[in-house]
């Protein structure tokens, strides 16, 4: 299997994992930069992630336009991925989803969404909130052009995650596996934080040092990272699709 086919194979697995873990439902999407061309990326055509196969993957440029002739409908919000991958050359995978547990933190002012559990440390110390109304007034809240997506990418800045007021979140990561892992643990961190707020009293967030310690020693296919990927892939009936890359090539 060549690198491009492996990336597309893993993108299919990632779609199924995000559906199985309820990060996405009929809506939400994940992308991965083309390993052979940093100016294009792969993403599914407009389809529920649970249903995505390799034949449903399309290649888009960093303006959100299809590289090849494509008659099938595309995600209306594909521009989110184009803008973030354009603004963040070090990042290779992005997720946009509407996971319910994160939504309160985009509409309430009191408590910021920050890491409170160790697996939530991947989201980083700062999670900015983007409000489409700030620069675009009354819209249907969807990011449907590059102007809006570039604005969102500017709010994301150098962070890993941004919330979208009344809508959802975006996340960016160095690898597909990391994007999936971050997007699975983001709503869980949000749920724990919400419950802690309900218990009352002061919230003890992870310290900057704890967040940094958790994110040191990055290896795309460390045993710990692969363990989660393997577990989630088997859980969503994609165990037969697992391809462990040659570590020497990573
Ligand atoms: Mn959306």
Image (tube, rainbow, N blue to C red):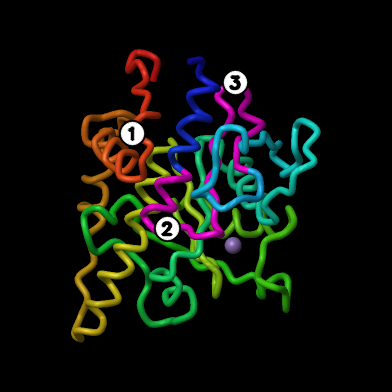
Q: Residue 85 in magenta?
A: no
Disc with the residue nearer the chain's start (3 vs 2) = 2
Label drawn at residue 36? 3
Quadrant for the C terminus, please: top left
The residue labelled by disc 1 is 239
Residue 105: give x, y in percent of width and height.
42, 74
Q: Mark 1: give few (<14), some (14-19) or many (20+) Cα within 10 Å.
A: some
Q: Quadrant of residue 154?
A: bottom right
Residue at 73% from the left image edge and 43% from the top image edge: 63
Give the quadrant of ligand 1: bottom right
Question: Looking at the image, is mark 1 or mark 3 nearer the viewer?
Answer: 1
Q: What is the magenta range?
A: 15-44
- The CA distance from mark 1 to mark 3 is 26 Å
Q: Is residue 194 left or right of residue 130?
A: left
Q: Is residue 13 left or right of residue 74?
A: left
Q: Is residue 50 left or right of residue 195?
A: right
The answer to which of 77 and 121 lies nearer the viewer is: 77
- The CA distance from mark 1 to mark 2 is 19 Å
Residue at 77% from the left image edge and 37% from the top image edge: 70
Residue 146: give x, y in percent of width and height.
73, 53
Report helix, strand or loop for mark 2.
Answer: loop
Label drawn at residue 79? none
The residue labelled by disc 2 is 23
Q: Quadrant of residue 205?
A: bottom left
Report helix, strand or loop for mark 3.
Answer: loop
């Amino acid at each position: 299997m060549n690198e491009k086919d492996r990336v597309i194979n893993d993108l299919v697995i990632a779609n199924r994992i995000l559906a199985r873990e309820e990060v996405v439902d009929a809506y939400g999407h994940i992308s991965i930069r083309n390993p052979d061309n940093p100016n294009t990326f792969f993403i599914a055509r407009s389809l529920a992630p649970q249903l995505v196969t390799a034949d449903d993957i399309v290649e888009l440029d960093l303006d959100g336009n299809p590289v090849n002739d494509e008659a099938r409908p595309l995600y209306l919000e594909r521009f989110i991925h184009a803008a973030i991958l354009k603004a963040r050359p070090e990042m290779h995978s992005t997720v946009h989803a509407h996971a319910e547990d994160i939504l309160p933190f985009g509409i309430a002012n009191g408590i910021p969404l920050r890491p409170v559990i160790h697996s939530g440390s991947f989201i980083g110390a700062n999670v900015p909130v983007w409000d489409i109304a700030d620069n675009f007034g009354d819209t249907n809240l969807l990011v449907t052009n590059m102007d809006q997506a570039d604005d969102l990418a500017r709010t994301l800045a150098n962070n890993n995650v941004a919330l979208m007021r009344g809508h959802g979140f975006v996340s960016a990561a160095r690898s597909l596996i990391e994007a999936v892992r971050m997007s699975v643990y983001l709503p869980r961190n949000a749920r724990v934080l919400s419950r802690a707020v309900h218990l009352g009293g002061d919230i003890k967030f992870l310290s900057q040092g704890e967040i940094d310690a958790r994110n040191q020693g990055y290896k795309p296919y460390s045993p710990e990272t692969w363990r989660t990927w393997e577990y989630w892939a088997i859980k969503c009936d994609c165990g037969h699709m697992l391809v462990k890359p040659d570590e020497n090539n990573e």
